[in-house]
Image (spheres, grey):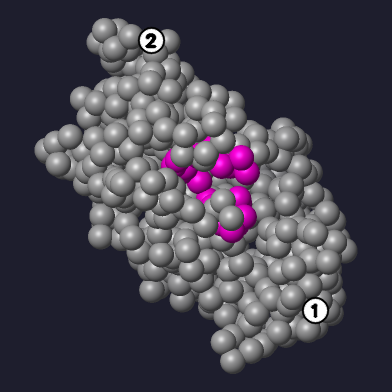
Amino acid sequence: MPVKRIGLLAVIVMLAGWLAACSNDDEGEVGGSEEAISNLNTEGMPIVDEPIQLEIFAGKAATTADDWNDVLLLNEYEEMTNIDITWNQVPADGLEERRNLALASGDLPDAFYAANLTISDIQTYGSQGIFIPLNDLIEEYAPNIAQVLEENPDIQSGITFPDGNIYSIPTVYAPDFQSLLIGAKGWVNGDWLEQLGMDNPETTEEFYEYLKAVKETDLNGNGENDEIPLSSVAEMDRIIHWISGAFGVQNKGQQHAMIDEDPDTGDLRFFPTSDAYRNMLEYLNQLYDEGLIEQSIYTLEVDQHLANAANNLYGAVQFFNPVELYGEEIGGQFIPGNALEGPDGTKMYTGIASPVRSLGNFVITSENENPEATLRWIDYFWSDEGAKMFFMGIEGVTYEETEDGPQLLEEITNDPDGLTLTQALAKYIINPGGNHPVMITDDYFTGSENSPLDKEAAEHIDPYLIEEIWPSFTYTEEESADITILEADLDKYISEMQAAFITGEQDFDQWDSYVETVENMKLDEYMEIQQAAYERYQES
């Protein structure tokens, strides 16, 4: 064999061996270097002996601390852990663009935090190795997260992708924190019920009669016919969460806006083309057409809603705690609304979410040289001690220990500068604004859902809450590519037509045409993907 041929063959063999070695490395355990591991403490503080630095891309809510690079909570935590983080915060209005640019450029941070990554993105970049699998790391270095997953198989199933990997740490609501799982609730003006001599409505017909009476009566006593029977803010979704159960629609919870379970067959159902969904829209159209729903519902901003409430205009609202939003004088008039019974006797409350929220809130990238330490950094906030610190802040600065447990200080709850509780806390902690990869329990949560009134409202509808709540489904890489497009098109058209039917811009004699259009938007293909995802969910 000629010498040159021998040399070429040797190079090929060496290259093949090198590629195989790289492949084996990719398929092996994910983790930091020996140096990184030797610097790591597997329990207690500090997390690392010698300080390390991380760069984290973070979504910035409008209500959170202005600069996470200099906020009390994280400064204290840096001292505890020896982990110095440079936070690159991106406001919501530019988050998607900046996040996609970071992913496409290859100039990756060590982690993405509260970046609102889509399930499709997690699947795609996870399968490419850009986001590392966390299964083994959780088992070895995140005992608090591991305990939650072990005790709640539904949560573990909800964050595990079809390839068997966990790529992200989500926001998790404690399964027994029903007030938070429900979120915004229905409230009825109890003072006005008393004036009208009416009981708290139990059925959709009684609800209609009450709203009609509100519109026709000067209940606020200002001499004008300005009462607004029913309102929410900038969307119909919240109102639909209140009444959908009366029609058996969206009967597996809020995470699925187009699919649920057919009550007759037990099969997966695309409910926006069902008779039940049409019946619900016809009811809402009746309310809207008769002026019983605030006519600006699709554009109404929070400030205007609060101004209307301050003028005592509302008979019923589907929103957050009215006392905290409207003040005691106005908000104190409201009582928890009932789960409503529909025309055919159906009575359930479907406006509740799965404990697994915002799946893409914390991922570690392949650029991270200290994944174990990074995971330990977030795991601490899943412990009782860490959760208290995360939600309450620093003892003596934001809260004090009492016989009844930790309580926020007076200067936080009654800020001398007139700041709201959220604004006052945001000077010290990062929690206001949400989307944090932590588990939220009622032990230390300071949001309105933890107030006695909200808990009373949750208990009020508890007997009618749906028993099985589906988390968002996960998909294979191939499914993700297809369903992202299919779902976007379907959701856009159905949302537009929902509004058109409710407001009367579209007559119901066009229903069959609407259904036909939906079916022609590759609905069969969409449902095949959802069926496969649903079956995986059932089997997991």
391 vs 260, left or right, is: right
x, y percent for residue 328: 59, 58
For disc 2, the neighbor class at 10 Å (few under 14, some 14 to 19, many from 20) is: some
Say which amino acid is labelled 1. Val
Q: Is residue 21 above or below residue 8?
A: below
Please name the residue shown 14% across and 41% down the image.
Answer: 345
Please, which residue is most extreme toward the right here? 70
On the image, numbered disc 2 is attached to which residue? Answer: 506
In front: 343, or 37? 343
Q: Which of 255 and 352 is in front in this view?
A: 352
In the picture shown, does residue 36 fall above or below 315? below
Comparing 466 with 506, the one in front is 506
- Badge number at residue 397: 1
Q: Please provide percent x and percent y for residue 199.
A: 28, 49
Which numbered dot is residue 268? none
Which quarter of the figure is the C terminus placed in?
A: bottom left
Three-letter code for the amino acid on which mark 2 is drawn = Gln
- Pick the residue in front: 511 or 370: 511
Label 1 CA crowd tier, 10 Å (few <14, some 14–19, many 20+): some
Query: Tag 1, which secondary structure?
Result: loop
Q: Where is residue 325 in the image (x, y as percent from the top left)?
A: 61, 51
Image quarter where the N terminus lies is top right
Residue segment shown in magenta: 309-328
Residue at coordinates 25% horizontally, 47% vertically from top-left?
A: 202
Horizontal and vertical percent for residue 18? 66, 51
**Earlier along the polypeptide chain: callout 1 or callout 2?**
1
